[in-house]
Image (cartoon, rainbow, N blue to C red):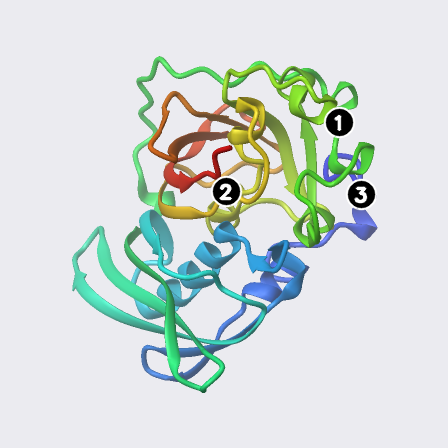
Amino acid sequence: MPDAASAPATLRATIGDSEFDRDTAVARRAPGVYDIDLSAGWTIISAVNGGYLLAVLGRALADTLPHSDPFTISAHYLTASQPGPAVVRTETVRTGRSLSTGQASLFQPDEQGREVERIRVLASYGDLDALPDDVRTTAEPPAIPPMDQCFGPEDGPAPVEGSSAITDRLMLKLDPATLGWALGAPSGRGEMRSWFGLADGRDQDPLSLLLAVDALPPTAFELGLSGWVPTVELTAHVRARPAPGPLRISVTTRNLAGGFLEEDAEVWDSADRLVAQSRQLARVRLG
C-alpha cells in the first residue's frame, strides 16, 4: 500500500481528483436532493464505513449551504448502509453571516423498494479560513513512534473477519503500543493511535477529516473484544484546515458499560495543530 508521506509527486492524487473525491461525489437531481452510488471500497464486512458516510452527507450539505466548511456535524446511524444506490436529502435550517445550519438524511431502498433512512445528520458550516489565529490550549499531539516503526494492516491479518476493503484505500501506521490485540495480548487500556493518510497520497481537507475520525480499528480490540462495533451516534468538530502531510490520530475509550462504549478521537496535522475532534457512542458484542 502506498505511503502517503513518501509517494512520488507524480503519483499523488490531489484534492478534488482522487478516489475519495470520486466516491463521495453526489449528483444534484433537484434542489436539496442528491444521488450517489455508495462504493464497496469503503466497507467493513458488508457495511459502509460511518466516516465515509459522514463525508458523503458533508459534501451534500456543502453544496446546499452558503458556507462550505463543516464546523460541527452530528450523525445518528439508524440502519447499516450497503454499497449501491442511495439518495441524500438536505434542508437548510438557518443561515447567518458566519455560520449556516442544515440537516441531511441518506436513504436506500429495501428489498421491497421502499425507502429506508440509514443516517440523519445536523450540521453547522462556516469558513475555516476566516477564523482568528488565536490558540490557547493544553492539548498536546499524541506521542506516536516514527512511521517506519509503526505497523499497518498489510503487516498482519485483517482486524475484522470478512471484507475490510476500506483498509486498501487508507495509509494507516498504528502505534505498536496499541497493537496488543493483533498479537492476542490486548492491553485493556482502550487506546488506539495511528498515522493516517489516503493510500493515493491525496492531502487532507475538512471533508476527509470526517472520514479520519472514524477510520482506525475500534478501541474495543484493545479492551479484549472482537467483531464489528457499529456506531450509534457520532459528533465531529472540524477545528482547522489541515496542513499537507500525514495526520496523527488518537482514540481513547474510558468507559464501557451496558454493551456500549464511547470513543474520543483527536486528529493532529503535520504542523502540530489539533484539526478535528470527535466523540461517538458505539455498541459492542460482549461474551
**Tag nearer the camera, 1 or 3:** 1
Three-letter amino acid code at disc 2?
Val
**Tag nearer the camera, 3 or 2:** 2
Task: Kindly tell me whether residue 35 is visible in this rendering.
Answer: yes
Q: Which mark is residue 151?
A: 1
Viewer-proximal residue among 115 and 73 = 115
Q: Would residue 46 be found to the left or right of residue 88 on screen?
A: right
Q: Earlier in the sequence, mark 3 or mark 2?
A: 3
Q: CA distance from mark 2 to mark 1?
A: 22 Å
Residue at 22 percent of width and 51 percent of height:
98
Residue at 47 percent of width and 60 percent of height:
80
Query: How many badges with numbers are in the image?
Result: 3
Three-letter amino acid code at disc 1?
Phe
**Residue 273, image x, y percentages:** 47, 26
Tell me, yes or no, whether the two marked residues, 1 and 3, touch with CB atoms within 8 Å.
Answer: no
Q: Quadrant of residue 21?
A: bottom right
**Tag nearer the camera, 2 or 1:** 2
Q: Which residue matches tag 3?
A: 2
**Residue 265, image x, y percentages:** 44, 31
Q: Which residue matches tag 2?
A: 229
